[in-house]
Amino acid sequence: MSSVSKSADAVEQYIGLPYHLLVVRDGEDKGKPWVASVEELAGCTSRGKTPDEALSGVQAAMASWIAAALQEGREVPEPKSATSHSGRLLLRMPRTLHADLTRASEREGVSLNQFITDVLAAAVGWRDRQSPSAPPGSISQAPGAEGMTAEPIRRRKSGPTPLVAVALAANFVIVAVAAIVAIVVLVYNVL
């Protein structure tokens, strides 16, 4: 078998792997084109007038990207797997934020770990992307899933006044944004 056909076979094998695709509009203007990119393959993108058009060109972009990488002797990254993440995260944060998060979790009657997980999941819309086969709202992480709940955070029966509810919601949003910023800074500093 020639090296060209071996290379073509390798490209086909890589293209068949479950890479993560991201489709976004290239700017906020509705007239801007759509861009489809392969998260694991830096710079591998395709453009189109519609999301479908951008996606339809991504396979050809992947083939070109992978063929060039193989020809140059570069490593072709394989798709990231959700199972490659342990579900454990060490996070440093200001003491005052830690105190605020602890008080909020106590008000809600849940553990700090569960509270932070619920806030982060809500901030990124994680529960909405769960597999259709999972029961609605279920959190399935192993190990340690038994300590997590799928139930949304509920108010006490006495319930806060509308003004307090708005203040609490604003507080949760601020805490979620601060947590996400802290994670980004931590990851940036580690890299």
Image: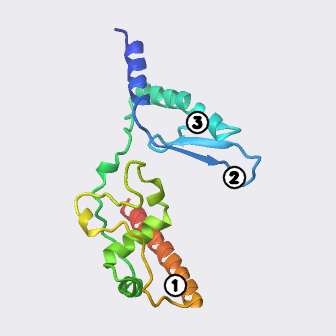
> Do labels 1 and 3 touch, CB within 8 Å?
no
Q: Of helix, strand and loop, which one carries label 1?
A: helix
Question: Which mark is first along the chain, 3 or 2?
Answer: 2
Does residue 112 sit above or below 49 in this rendering? Answer: below
> Do labels 2 and 3 touch, CB within 8 Å?
no
Does residue 30 sit above or below 37 in this rendering? Answer: below
Q: Residue sitting at 48 percent across and 57 percent down?
A: 128
Q: Residue sitting at 33 percent across and 73 percent down?
A: 114
Q: Is residue 56 left or right of residue 136?
A: right
Gap between marks 1 and 3 measured at Cα: 41 Å
Question: Which mark is first along the chain, 3 or 1?
Answer: 3
In front of the other: 9 or 141? 141
Does residue 167 sit above or below 188 in this rendering? Answer: below
> Looking at the rendered structure, which numbered label has been put on residue 27?
2
Q: What percent of the width, then of the height, locates residue 189?
A: 40, 65
* Pointer 3 local density, CA inside 10 Å: few below 14, some 14–19, many at least 20: many
- Residue receiving disc 3: 55
Does residue 29 sit above or below 7 in this rendering? Answer: below
Q: Residue sitting at 37 percent across and 9 percent down?
A: 2
**Foreground tag (1 vs 3):** 1
> Looking at the rendered structure, which numbered label has been put on residue 168?
1
* Pointer 2 local density, CA inside 10 Å: few below 14, some 14–19, many at least 20: few
Tag 1: amino acid = Leu
Splitting the image into 4 quarters, where does residue 184 fall?
Answer: bottom left
Splitting the image into 4 quarters, where does residue 56 fall?
Answer: top right
Q: Of helix, strand and loop, which one carries label 3?
A: helix
Tag 2: amino acid = Gly
Farthest left residue in view: 143
Task: State the quadrant of the C terminus.
Answer: bottom left
Gap between marks 2 and 3 measured at Cα: 17 Å
